Image: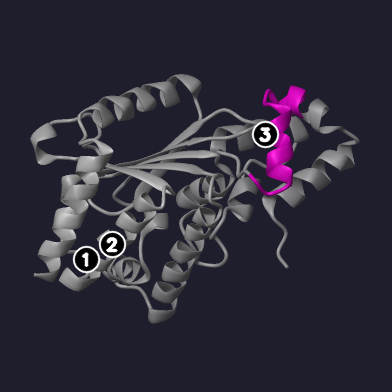
Amino acid sequence: MAKTYGQWLKEAREAKGWTQEELAKKAFVSRSLIANIEIGNRFPNDADAQRLDKALGTPGDVLTTFRPGAATGGVPDWWEQARVLEQQATIIREFGLSLIPGFLQTEAYATAVIEANYPRESEERRHKGVVTRLGRAKLLEDPVTPEVWALLDEAVIRRPTGGREVMASQLDHIIALVESGRIRANILPFSATPHPLLDGMLTLMWFEDQPPVAYAEGVRTGMVHESPAMVAEIQGAYDLALSEAQPLHDSLGLLRATAKEYRA
């Protein structure tokens, strides 16, 4: 099995005879970050990796060697970091501008989204993408954690991704999750435009033992924000948009009505 960045970091640290606390002080990062990287819960951003390289006296391109997906042709590294964090989060706040958030997607919906990618990928890679996306949904198997809120722009439910029946089933899935109390979902109606989240999709995540982060994604790009000031700013934008959304009861009614329209 290929070595991970966390395994490499632990070996490099121990070769110096340093504790996690000692490396953290030399690299100007937190000990919890070192611990989470070493056990595979976190993947460092470029700035943290550069600080670790400088402290350890290692080449500056080490991160590239271990970047998730680099050797396997898997998911992009900028998304892999967010995916790992998603599995550790205790609270998740999602915003979908044009699509249902990934871990809330049905298999048929996910397949339709991935098949729309350009340039078109091989059947094997498309299948792998669907399996990966469905695997993320396992975090909902716990009846309590993470606490999930989904804020959906009305465009998300109006675009018949995959066709009318696929879309109806996808909305039924969201409705079932809301009715079971597993998630909350609010629809941001067209009448609320403009709102501060029109630039793209967004995920906010909170954890038990580390500061919150935000993940923002656009076309062919994504970024995990860890700066407390930036995360607070993004959270403020999310809260402002949420204040313009329909209440849970009304949102649930709109989801039901739209699913019925797709089947009419």
Q: Secondary structure at mark 2?
A: helix
Q: Is residue 30 magenta?
A: yes
Report crowding for label 3: few under 14, some 14 to 19, many 20 or more residues within 10 A (C-alpha): some
The amino acid marked with disc number 2 is: Asp
Residue that label 1 marks = 168
The answer to whether residue 117 is seen in the rendering is no
Task: State the separation of the CA atoms marked 2 and 3.
Answer: 39 Å
Q: Main secondary structure of the magenta part?
A: helix
Task: State the separation of the CA atoms marked 1 and 2.
Answer: 6 Å
Label 2 vs label 3, nearer the camera = 2
In the rendered image, residue 236, in percent from the top left (x then y), is placed at 34, 22
Quadrant in the picture for residue 99 = bottom left
Q: Indicate the colouring scheme.
A: one colour
The amino acid marked with disc number 1 is: Ala
- What residue appears at the point 25 percent right and 30 percent down from the top-left corner? 241
The answer to whether residue 253 is seen in the rendering is yes
In the rendered image, residue 176, in percent from the top left (x then y), is placed at 35, 58
- Lower position in the chain sequence, tag 2 or tag 3: 3
Q: Secondary structure at mark 3?
A: helix
The amino acid marked with disc number 3 is: Leu
Stretch in magenta:
24-41
Task: State the separation of the CA atoms marked 1 and 3.
Answer: 42 Å
Residue that label 2 marks = 172
Q: Which image quadrant: the N terminus? A: bottom right
Residue that label 3 marks = 33
